[in-house]
Amino acid sequence: MCCPPRRVRRGAALTIVFAGVLAAGAATGSFGAPGPVDSAGAGDRPVSIEHSAPTGHHEDVAEAAAEALAEGKSATEAAERAVSRSGDRWGAVYSEGEYEAFEEALDGEYTGVGLGARRERDGRIEVSRVRAGSPAARAGIREGDRLRTVDGRDVDGRPVTEVVSLLRGDDHDAAAGTAVTVGLERDARAWSETLRRARLSTDPVTVRETAAGVTVVRVAAFTKGSGELVRAAVDRARADTGIVLDLRGNSGGLVAEAVTAASAFLDGGLVATYDVDGDQRALHAEPGADISRPLVALVDGGTMSAAELLTGALQDRGRAVVVGSRTFGKGSVQMPGRLPDGSVAELTVGHYRTPSGREVDGRGITPDLETDEDALRRAETVLSGLGAPS
């Protein structure tokens, strides 16, 4: 699948698929444009970054880039070094093309082969997801296959971000129709496939009804329009059924979309607060939601960023029982800024908190009912206790 750029600094834990789009855990979430962004790996993008006011941190990085450019050196590499020295865990630098690609992903489209990847403890890279109808699916690649090489490069031990970057390609060869050759292994069989990248669309929100009569609304990521899709799904659900909001593996998205999704379950009120360089701000749901319908939120260690913001709001306000495992713990706010060579530096400027004031960054959200197995079944049991059919 479309992946984060080669030069992005990411922790080893960021091996989450973003909406089936940013397969190394590149998730984003904008608080608006222009303005701060809340990212889970690739950083959130406002609609425009040209007028984002630089902070001192941005000025330091921009100055390093400008000096390098004046000396005939790489401004992007200089900016990366400056970000690295700053200790900003979520800071990242993107080329102009890379940044545009992520903006496209937030629109629900991307260029890729339909592969998600994860790194195992022994350093091997496995296929974590294969998108139906994608070039990878047509080639017969399956979840669980070992990914050995990409265009002849051994990927064992590489960060997932780098692996999926190789899958996507450099700026000049990431277009639809370009080829990438992957070396694979399944059981005792080893083989290679040459895939043609294609324009793929995402399905950020899917809805189904279980045999027990429970409506499951799964949100893979908060891309543009996903919030309204959640609201529409809730409106269409049978009035006598409980709802499971499945946020497992959701590594974030546009925060504005998460707030819109919150408006499907909360009758107005506070969703989260956040700060930008000490300036306190708040996000509120729209009034009018039916709050009588039983609700369970499913989460896991891949629930990040904007998805954690939504989970925290539902939990703090007593609207949902949260079931699953502790969430990732990404609650910082990033601001993007344009560098002299057209690349983009995205740097941390603050953090958000749940309605009760809980910090999420580095802590995550603890479910009301912790379980690693049969989470959906447990959710159905909880809904039964809340008065929903099961």
Image (cartoon, rainbow, N blue to C red):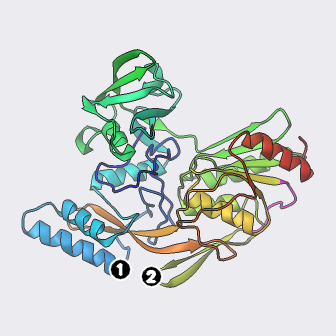
Tell me: residue 207, above or below residue 34: above
The front one of 367 and 66 is 367
State the image coordinates of residue 292 (x, y, percent, origin top left).
87, 59
Residues under numbered marks 2 and 1 in contact, where contact means CB atoms less than 8 Å apart: yes
**Which of the labelled discs sits on residue 362, or is there none?**
none
Q: At 51% from the left edge and 41% from the top edge, which residue is drawn? A: 20
Q: Which residue is mark 1?
A: 55
Q: Is residue 289 magenta?
A: yes
Q: At 18% from the left edge and 63% from the top edge, which residue is drawn? A: 75
Of callouts 2 and 1, which one flags the residue occurring earlier in the amino acid sequence? 1
What segment carries the magenta color? 287-294
Dominant secondary structure of the residues highlighted in magenta in the image: loop
Tell me: residue 191, above or below residue 6: above
193 relative to 293 in the view: left or right: left
Q: Is residue 323 visible?
A: yes
State the image coordinates of residue 59 (x, y, percent, origin top left).
28, 78
State the image coordinates of residue 45 (x, y, percent, origin top left).
43, 61
338 relative to 274 in the view: left or right: left
State the image coordinates of residue 54 (x, y, percent, origin top left).
34, 77
**Which of the labelled discs sits on residue 277, or is there none?**
2
Secondary structure at badge 1 equals: loop
Quarter of the figure with the N terminus? top left
Q: Is residue 310 magenta?
A: no
Quarter of the figure with the C terminus? top right
Residue type at mark 2: give it: Asp
75 relative to 157 in the view: left or right: left
Quarter of the figure with residue 180: top left
Tell me: residue 131, above or below residue 216: above
CA separation, marks 2 and 1? 8 Å
